[in-house]
Amino acid sequence: MTTNQETRLTALLGQNSFIELAARERSRQLLDAGSGRELVGPFERLSSPWLAQQGVVTQADDGVVVTKGSFNGQSCVVLAIEGAFQGGSLGEVGGAKIAGALELAALDNRNGIPTMAIIVFETGGVRLQEANLGLAAIAEIHSAIVDLRRCQPVIGIVAGTVGCFGGMSIAAALCSYFIVTREARLGLNGPAVIEQEAGIAEYDSRDRSFIWSITGGEQRALSGLVDVLAEDDVQQIRSHVAQLLARGVPRMHRSEQTARFISALDAADAATQATPGMARAIYAQGAQ
Amino acid sequence: MNSARQAEISRGARWFGALAGPALAGYPASLLVADGALGTRPVRWIAVVPDAHNRFERARHGEVGLIEGWHLARAVQEVVAADAGKPARTAIIAIVDVASQAYGRREEAYGIHLALAAAAGAYAAARLAGHPVVALIVGKAMSGAFLAHGYQAGRIVAFDDPEVMVHAMGKASAARITLRSVEALTALAETIPPMAYDIKNFAALGLLSATLNVADPDQPQPADLDLVGQALQDMLASMDAEAEHDLSTRLGSPLRQASQRVRELLRLQWSQTVTE
């Protein structure tokens, strides 16, 4: 074993993996030590009324954990989706937890309390067993992010291994700042759906290296579509959050940079099938 | 207009033409934008329509793709910028007939999620800035396409018609993802209101402000234009009377009790101090 490999191994062994943590623990560790308090927790037994009707096993927190506490002393709410329950899909209850908490954070700001929000995405998007109520909740989440981000940065994280897709990828793109790891994937349509709709030649859902080359965290960072590519380490992710928070509310959010993205897409060669390199190239101009 | 020609023009385009008139130049062919008025109220009309020559081949049938998302954002941002510092707020009416978002490799590679966020974010920001925004669903309002174009409106109105449909995913894909057959999925939709595709079930969820019975949803008639125009004006007036520009009017249905209960508990627990 060479010295380089030894150094790498020591670093890896010293890391405290964020990916391996469940949603509740992720939230607790992001917040200041001991400050986290779960709201509408599992003992409220607010599980999905719709899954039960379909004979699908429910979970007492519906797969979303709301934790209020402080981040470096500032009032903060962490909304973490549990990817291990129903693929992190958003139904009525889980969606209402996220939207409702963001609405209260915005209200705090209007009342002079500068509450910020961190959203930990691990989700395939709408829970299809609750289809239209999931979609409605996601629209309400979009609205609440846009409202809150006028006052305080809304920081998104997708660590993996589920990734972030569907309507929740739109929510991710509305965040003020976004952190990914190499294990993360971020895209609108899940690979199986694209293959179903467009064919295997367009998108081979079983080709993992291809999927990561298009939607993986590193590619998204190199294309400037997210802000930070982080190591899978709790402390490093926490310090990235602190640095992003210190930047304050962006003068113009990425999703508001209409002129820049329209001119980049105008310059893209739409007749040729996209490659990871083309995506990096078209957005290299004007990237921050 | 002969019937062959009609077949090429989408419902959304026909209603846009009848309500808004000629589209402004300067937008992609898949995006129709016009400035007009409802009564005395200035209005910007916006529709996404099929463009057989779309540069992006996966967005040639009326899908909301990369170009559509960003230009929707632009069309809405222009209204907000033009009214900044003025007391009056131009209304925005999204005519919705969108079968889906665009599914493709280019779309994912170039960040279609961000393009749709741009559109959804622009509509939400306009509403929060006091622009009354109405979505008029004349055809399909599906999934990400609807999130980008219409779902941020303060009021949603829809034609009461079998062709009108709101859902999170097309049936074939939804069946594949949930490991069910299309038949099983259709059967479930009969008893589980949020899984249904039709507008009556969508209305039962409390997400619609009105359903409109037009004589011919495929061919706007003068009486229908009056009906739709009046309904839209009523929506604008009701929003002008509100202090908040949020989406809380959607929460009242008995089928959304859980959405209300979660918010109620969050409010109660939000400011409590730790009692351990």
Image (cartoon, coloured by chain):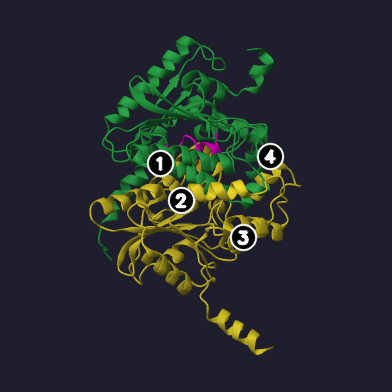
Q: Residue at x 55, y 25 (%)?
A: B12
Q: Residue at x 56, y 51 (%)?
A: A86
Nearer the viewer's eye, disc 3 or disc 4? 4
Within 10 Å of disc 1 (Cα), the crowding (few <14, some 14-19, many 20+) is: many
| Quadrant of the rendering where the N terminus of chain B is positioned | top right
Q: What element carries label 4?
A: helix
Q: What residue sits right under mark 4 in the picture?
A: B57
Chain letter of the residue beneath label 1 in the structure image: B
Answer with mark 4 or mark 1, whichever residue precedes in sequence.
4
Name chain B's colour: green
Q: Is there one chain holding both mark 1 and mark 2?
A: no
Q: What residue type is labelled 2?
A: Leu
Residue A174 screen position, x and y as percent: 46, 51
Q: Is there one chain holding both mark 4 and mark 1?
A: yes
**Which residue is most to the right?**
A201
Chain letter of the residue beneath label 3 in the structure image: A
Q: Could you tell me if residue A91 is visible in this image?
A: no
Residue A38 higher or lower than B58, as above or below: below
Q: What residue sits right under mark 3 in the picture?
A: A216
Q: What residue sits right under mark 2 in the picture?
A: A174
CA separation in Å, label 4 and label 1: 29 Å
CA separation in Å, label 1 and label 2: 11 Å
Q: What stretch is highlighted in magenta?
A: B142-152
What label sits on residue B124 in the rendered view? 1
